């Protein structure tokens, strides 16, 4: 299915610039999304940046209790002068220090006492930029809504999920190797 009709209001979070789109639907505190995220740059390197574009899409999941705040903070990082590079730094840091953004058993632990401001501040440090003003931008609010609509319109409910060339790819998972992903992509790459 096509992207929502309204234009995406922020710089795209993408790796590569090729004609074959791989949409990767991630939840920023999900351990399986982390495993997938770490493979994207090596995948682009293996396939060729001129052949593949990995588009990062967010699917916020309510059992990850800070998910909407963390997602919006990543998008806020992309809205700063540092752009997508800051957003990728934020994602790398969130995945590296996942325990700072997740609850024990999704319901308890030290993060119960953290505030949204503390979370946004910590993600800003990981991104290397103050996110206080960007977090409040209307364009960031529109972007998080865009991601929610895009995932729903495409029937995405879990993370990570993948679409190749606009079609859901049920055979692709975070547990596969880069070589297995390359084989799944091969028919779309014309090679």
Image (tube, grey):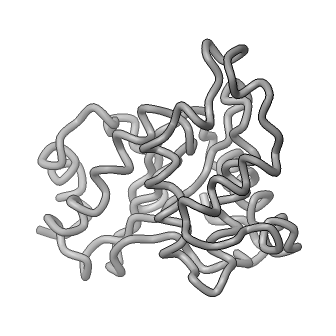
**Residue occupying the point 80% across, 65% down:** 135
Residue 187 locus on image (x, y percent): 20, 58
**Residue occupying the point 77% across, 35% down:** 114
**Residue occupying the point 62% across, 64% down:** 2
Q: Quadrant of residue 51?
A: bottom left
Residue 128 locus on image (x, y percent): 55, 70
Residue 68 locus on image (x, y percent): 75, 45
Q: Is residue 173 above or below residue 3?
A: above
Q: Nearer the viewer, residue 140 or 93?
A: 93
Q: Is residue 182 above or below residue 102?
A: below
Single out the residue that lies furthest toward the bottom: 81
Q: Is residue 175 above or below residue 10?
A: above
Relative to 187, 19 lies left or right = right
Q: Nearer the viewer, residue 15 or 72?
A: 72
Residue 15 locus on image (x, y percent): 38, 71
Relative to 182, 119 lies left or right = right
Relative to 114, 71 lies left or right = left
**Residue occupying the point 69% across, 77% down:** 79
């Amino acid at each position: 299915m096509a992207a929502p009709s309204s234009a995406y209001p922020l710089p795209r979070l993408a790796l590569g610039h090729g004609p074959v789109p791989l949409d990767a639907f991630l939840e920023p505190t999900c351990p399986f999304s982390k495993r997938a995220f770490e493979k994207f740059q090596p995948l682009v390197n293996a396939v060729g940046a001129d052949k593949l574009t990995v588009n990062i899409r967010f699917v916020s999941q309510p059992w990850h209790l800070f998910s909407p705040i963390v997602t919006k903070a990543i998008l806020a990082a992309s809205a700063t002068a540092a752009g997508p590079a800051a957003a990728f730094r934020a994602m790398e840091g969130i995945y590296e220090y996942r325990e700072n953004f997740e609850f024990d058993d999704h319901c308890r632990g030290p993060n119960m006492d953290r505030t949204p401001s503390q979370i946004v501040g910590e993600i800003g440090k990981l991104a290397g930029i103050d996110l206080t003003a960007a977090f409040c931008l209307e364009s960031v609010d529109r972007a998080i809504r865009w991601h929610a609509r895009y995932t729903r319109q495409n029937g995405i409910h879990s993370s990570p999920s993948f679409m190749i060339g606009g079609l859901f790819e049920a055979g692709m998972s975070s547990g596969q190797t880069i070589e297995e992903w390359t084989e799944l992509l091969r028919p779309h790459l014309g090679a």
